[in-house]
Amino acid sequence: MMARKIILLGASLSNSLLLVLMICLGSQNLSDRHNINLGFSSTESYPTGFLVGISIALGSLSGGLTASLITTSRNKEY
């Protein structure tokens, strides 16, 4: 069962990193740039597609990590 969690973690990490790589390559020459106001500071100006893509990649990563951490083994008795 531990191998299943490790495979799920690895797949989630590799898919998210691949998604971030593709987003970085695809948003090189976009001219429409915005920044994010964090309340105490603001970020640099980034292309809108990059900001949306990073949020999707982080959501995918957090969902995959959550799914791998809450899977339980079938042979545990409560």
Image: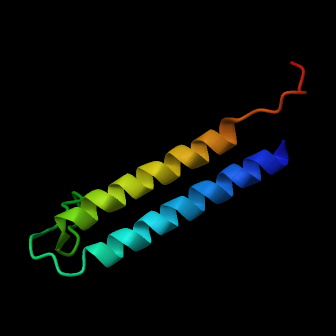
Question: Which residue is the extreme one toward the bottom?
Answer: 29
x 18%, y 60%: residue: 37
- Compared across the picture, whether 35 is left or right of 70 comes to left
In the rendered view, would you say 78 is above or below 60?
Answer: above
- Compared across the picture, whether 16 is left or right of 38 comes to right
What color scheme is it? rainbow
Residue 1, image x and y in percent?
84, 41
Number of labels in the image equals: 0
- Compared across the picture, whether 48 is left or right of 10 comes to left
x 21%, y 57%: residue: 39
In the rendered view, would you say 22 is above or below 76?
Answer: below
Residue 75, image x and y in percent?
90, 27
Quadrant location of the C terminus in the rendered image: top right
Give 27 or 66, whichever is nearer the viewer. 27
Residue 73, image x and y in percent?
82, 33
- Compared across the picture, whether 29 is left or right of 60 comes to left
Question: Which residue is the extreme one toward the left?
Answer: 32
In the rendered view, would you say 11 is above or below 34?
Answer: above
In the rendered view, would you say 22 is above or below 56?
Answer: below
x 84%, y 27%: residue: 74
Residue 14, image x and y in percent?
58, 64
x 67%, y 50%: residue: 8
Quadrant hosting residue 20: bottom left
Question: Which residue is the extreme one toward the top?
Answer: 78
